[in-house]
Amino acid sequence: MKHRSKGRKFGRKTDVRRALMRSLAVALVKSEKIKTTEAKAKELRPFIEKMLTKAREANLANRRAVASKIGIISTKKLFDKIAP
C-alpha cells in the first residue's frame, strides 16, 4: 500500500535524489525552461513553487532559506527578476 508515502524515489538514495532536485531547480531558474521527464517535472513543481512563494516577500530570512536550497547566484535571479 502507498499510505503516507510521499514523493517519488527515482531509484536513487536520499542525498542523490535531493541533489537531483537541486540541480533541476537551478537549471530551471537559470534558463527558465528545461527538458526532463514527466515524473521529474511533477516532483520539481512543488519544490520550485515553495521557493517562488518565499521569493515574493524579499526579506533576509527568505533569501537565506532559498539560497540554502539552490545557491546564491540562482537566488539573486529568482528574487530580482522572476518573482516580481
Image (tube, rainbow, N blue to C red):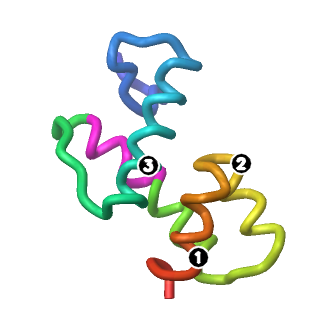
Compute the Cα span from label 3 to label 2: 12 Å
Residue 75 location, x and y as percent? 60, 63
Magenta segment includes 41: yes
Circle 2: residue type:
Ser
Q: Indicate the quadrant containing the N terminus: top left, top right, bottom left or bottom right.
A: top left
Q: Where residue 25 is drawn, which disc sits there?
A: 3
Residue under the point 78% across and 79% down: 59
Asked if the residue at tag 1 contacts the one at tag 2, i.e. Cβ–Cβ closer than 8 Å, the answer is no
- What residue range appears in magenta? 40-47
Residue at horizontal 58 percent and vertical 49 percent from the top: 70
Could you say which quadrant of the image residue 38 lies in? top left
Residue 7 rendering spot, x and y as whole percentages: 41, 32
Element under disc 1: helix
Alpha carbon separation for disc pair 3 and 1: 14 Å
Residue 36 drawn at (x, y percent): 20, 39
Residue 84 in the image: above or below residue 49: below
Front one among 35 and 37: 35
Label 2 to label 1: alpha-carbon separation: 14 Å
Q: Residues within 10 Å of mark 1 (few under 14, many from 20)?
A: many
Question: Would you name the residue on which mark 1 appears?
Answer: 79
What residue is pinned by disc 2? 68
